[in-house]
Amino acid sequence: MGFHITVVGLGYVGLANALLLSQHNTVSALETNPDRVNLINKSMSPIQDHEIEQFLAQREHCIFATTDPFLALEHADFIVVATPTDYDPDTQYFNTTSVENVIAQALEINPLATIIIKSTVPVGFTEKMKSKHRTDNIIFSPEFLREGKALYDNLYPSRIILGALSEQANTFASLLKQGAHKQDVKVLLTHSTEAEAIKLFSNTYLAMRVAFFNELDTYCEAKDLNTKEIIDGVSLDVRIGDHYNNPSFGYGGYCLPKDTKQLLANFEGVPNDMISAIVSANETRKQHIVNTIMAKTPRKVGVYRLIMKTGSDNFRESAILDVIAHLHHAGAEIVVYEPNLHAPLSDNFSLNNSLSSFKAECDLIITNRVVDELDDVTDKLYTRDLFHKD
């Protein structure tokens, strides 16, 4: 059936791509975590994502997962790399070690396969890998997925971009398009370095939009203005639009914080004001949130959930973690309600996963997004969620 495709890494990006491609191809997955491998082979999702859970439940053995590199890579036509590349603040660059290791291993086991990098990498990384390994069979393809909606965003993509002007790139683009449920998906084949820049500039633009509406909200809080009325009026301009405009405690999640910092690092030696401002604006916003909370002189601050948004089980790089750290430094006593957490991440807070007890012991409860189960403590709530959407 179709091509033999191996996806390396079963996080949001890897699993979403594996399932999308499995509709018309034979797909294997290489994953170092045996628990994830076992869940996938039982058609169970290791991550919280409605479409992924539904897809796996309805299709038995749609992909085969393994921890064995030879078994996964040996016969693949395409090898999709979707391993994590966390931002390293010391080097001011993504840690691409996992991607580099997969590329080296893949070329050793199967030098004829085309490698598709889905992990986010610094601008210029793919050309560096092609030069190092003396091959043109390495292609970067940026991913534009939301946590909790990863498979949905692959089935209904905004665009498909391949960083190569080659037959292999065109073929892989057609496979992604073939798996999509959306009609008339726009496809762009470009050079690898430009494709890497597209990824970073796209996410930095989104971060800029979040930072803009958050700063608007900060102004309104300081001047005692109605934020919602102003955002409603601003958003009536079709050039601005009524989307991605809900104030928050700051942009967070796996992509926006690290991608903005990586882009800023790539700007070294290049004049800029906006990119650096986007990064610093997020820190300013979080400090404003902390100052506002501390001005209320709470006895005990409750934090409802560490996740950034509904439908996600991930709180990696969540803005609330920085807010908690600043609150702790300011002397606040903090209790967190987070059912996905079984022990505190640090000494900055204690954990109470009994919702009723959590509500009772805290005199101020902060939440990035309002949910129905907080309806009975609205008098205790502090949130900047105005539109009840992500």
Image (cartoon, grey):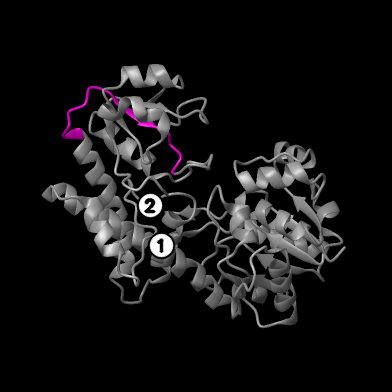
Residue beneath disc 1? 206
When the figure is inspected, residue 70 is found, relative to residue 48, above or below; the finding is below
**In the displayed structure, does residue 66 sit left or right of residue 287?**
right
Q: Position of residue 165 (x, y in %)?
A: 66, 83
Q: Which mark is residue 80?
A: none
Q: Position of residue 42 (x, y in %)?
A: 79, 38
Q: Residue at x 52, y 53 (%)?
A: 86
Sequence-earlier tag: 2 or 1 = 1
2 and 1 marks in contact (CB < 8 Å): yes
Q: Nearer the viewer, residue 36 or 174?
A: 174
User: How many neighbours does mark 2 have within 10 angstroms: few (below 14), some (14-19), or many (20 or more)?
Assistant: many
- Quadrant hosting residue 269: bottom left
| Start-end of magenta stretch | 294-308
Q: Nearer the viewer, residue 351 or 88?
A: 351
Q: Nearer the viewer, residue 255 or 157?
A: 157
Q: Residue at x 34, y 57 (%)?
A: 245
Is residue 127 rendered magenta in the image? no
Can residue 151 be seen in this snapshot?
Answer: yes
When the figure is inspected, residue 267 is found, relative to residue 385, above or below; the finding is below
> Between marks 2 and 1, how big is the CA–CA gap?
9 Å
**In the displayed structure, does residue 114 sit left or right of residue 266?**
right
When the figure is inspected, residue 389 is found, relative to residue 272, above or below; the finding is above
In which quadrant of the rendered image does the N terminus lie?
Answer: bottom right
Residue beneath disc 2? 251
User: How many neighbours does mark 1 have within 10 angstroms: few (below 14), some (14-19), or many (20 or more)?
Assistant: some
Q: Position of residue 102 (x, y in %)?
A: 70, 58
Secondary structure beneath dot 1 equals: helix
Is residue 301 rendered magenta in the image? yes
